[in-house]
Image (cartoon, rainbow, N blue to C red):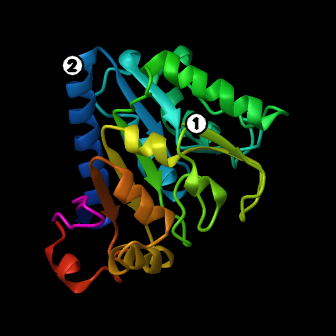
């Protein structure tokens, strides 16, 4: 089902986890094949959270040429890679090591460095070096928070107004840890495609608000508006507050 929001028509898939897993695997395999055929490499940015825990072990077995795949991250907490809360560490354990992804293809956000602003600049330079200017990811995968945040872009935060930087630092995130690095709305707008995943009843209000309220300032709504194409993967609990017409029409 394609639903209009701020001029964009996101595709919505509602289904049980096994259906979402199969669809995500198929979509990533197709996107990787197309990118590698067109440009020689596939560039993907990963989320953390519940989406990572559910999807990554299955995607480690996807039929993708990992030697030609570059991994980035949508955001990262200021934690060591070995900390259970590190998004890059989680991906490394559940996906990258099992799949045998070369170390040179892992472009993590170095939020564990002492100078976060310098770390953001370094991450941006690496993105541009790898992807060009502007740095265009083939797929940018985002989770959705209970408050409607995506990456580490939180409701009402100053970074929602960022217009130039692709990567930004923040030291005042409303969820711990406060210190983070995040991709920005311009980075979302530059991506060739965006996947957003929301699982569970606690995400339902934010999903519903993003579609019900015209011009909603939720980061989720802003990300959907910025994305050139977007695909939402929702389990039935997360989709329960979608407007009725969308809920009836969403692919299942």
Question: Do residues under tags 2 and 1 come within 8 Å of each other at their CB atoms?
Answer: no
Question: Which residue in the protein does label 1 denote?
Answer: 93
- Which quarter of the image is occupied by the C terminus? bottom left
Residue 140 horizontal/vertical position (percent): 41, 42
Quick one: label 1, few (<14), some, or many (20+) residues within 10 Å? some
Most common SS among magenta residues: loop
The part of the image, by quadrant, that contains residue 215 is bottom left
Per the rendering, the mark at residue 38 is: 2
Where residue 113 appears, x then y in whole percent?
Answer: 80, 31
Q: Residues within 10 Å of mark 2 (few under 14, many from 20)?
A: few
Q: Position of residue 55 (x, y in %)?
A: 41, 49
| Depicted 186 relative to depicted 136: above or below | below
Between residues 124 and 7, which one lies in front from this camera angle? 7
Q: Vertical placement of 158 versus 85: above or below? A: below
Residue 246 as seen in the image, left or right of residue 77: left
Point out the tag, 2 or 1, that comes first from the N-terminus: 2
The reply, left or right, for residue 62 in relation to residue 131 is left
Occupied quadrant, residue 103: top right
Q: Which mark, by number, is residue 199?
A: none
- Taking 75 as reference, is 64 left or right? left
Let me know if residue 236 is in the magenta part. no
Residue at position x 74%, y 37% in the image = 82
Residue 102: tell me if it is visible.
no
Residue plotted at (43% across, 28% down):
134
Which stretch is magenta? 1-11
The answer to which of 233 and 84 lies nearer the viewer is 233
In front: label 2 or label 1: 2
Q: CA distance from mark 2 to mark 1?
A: 30 Å
Query: Secondary structure under badge 1?
Result: helix
């Amino acid at each position: 089902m394609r639903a209009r929001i701020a001029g964009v028509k996101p595709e919505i898939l509602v289904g049980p986890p096994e259906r979402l897993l199969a669809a995500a695997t198929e979509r990533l395999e197709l996107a990787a094949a197309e990118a590698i055929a067109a440009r020689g490499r596939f560039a993907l940015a990963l989320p953390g959270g519940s989406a990572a825990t559910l999807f990554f072990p299955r995607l480690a077995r996807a039929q993708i040429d990992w030697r030609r795949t570059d991994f980035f991250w949508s955001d990262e907490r200021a934690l060591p890679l070995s900390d259970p809360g590190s998004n890059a560490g989680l991906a490394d354990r559940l996906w990258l090591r099992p799949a045998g992804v070369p170390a040179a293809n892992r472009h993590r956000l170095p939020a564990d460095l002492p100078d976060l602003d310098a770390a953001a600049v370094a991450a941006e330079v690496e993105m541009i070096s790898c992807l060009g200017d502007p740095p265009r990811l083939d797929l940018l995968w985002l989770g959705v928070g209970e408050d409607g945040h995506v990456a580490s872009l939180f409701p009402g935060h100053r970074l929602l107004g960022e217009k130039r930087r692709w990567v930004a630092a923040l030291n005042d995130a409303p969820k711990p840890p406060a210190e983070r690095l995040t991709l920005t709305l311009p980075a979302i707008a530059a991506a060739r495609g965006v996947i957003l995943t929301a699982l569970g009843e606690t995400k339902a209000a934010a999903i519903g608000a993003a579609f019900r309220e015209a011009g909603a300032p939720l980061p989720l709504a802003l990300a959907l508006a910025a994305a050139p194409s977007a695909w939402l993967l929702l389990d039935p609990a997360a989709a329960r507050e979608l407007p009725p017409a969308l809920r009836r029409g969403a692919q299942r």
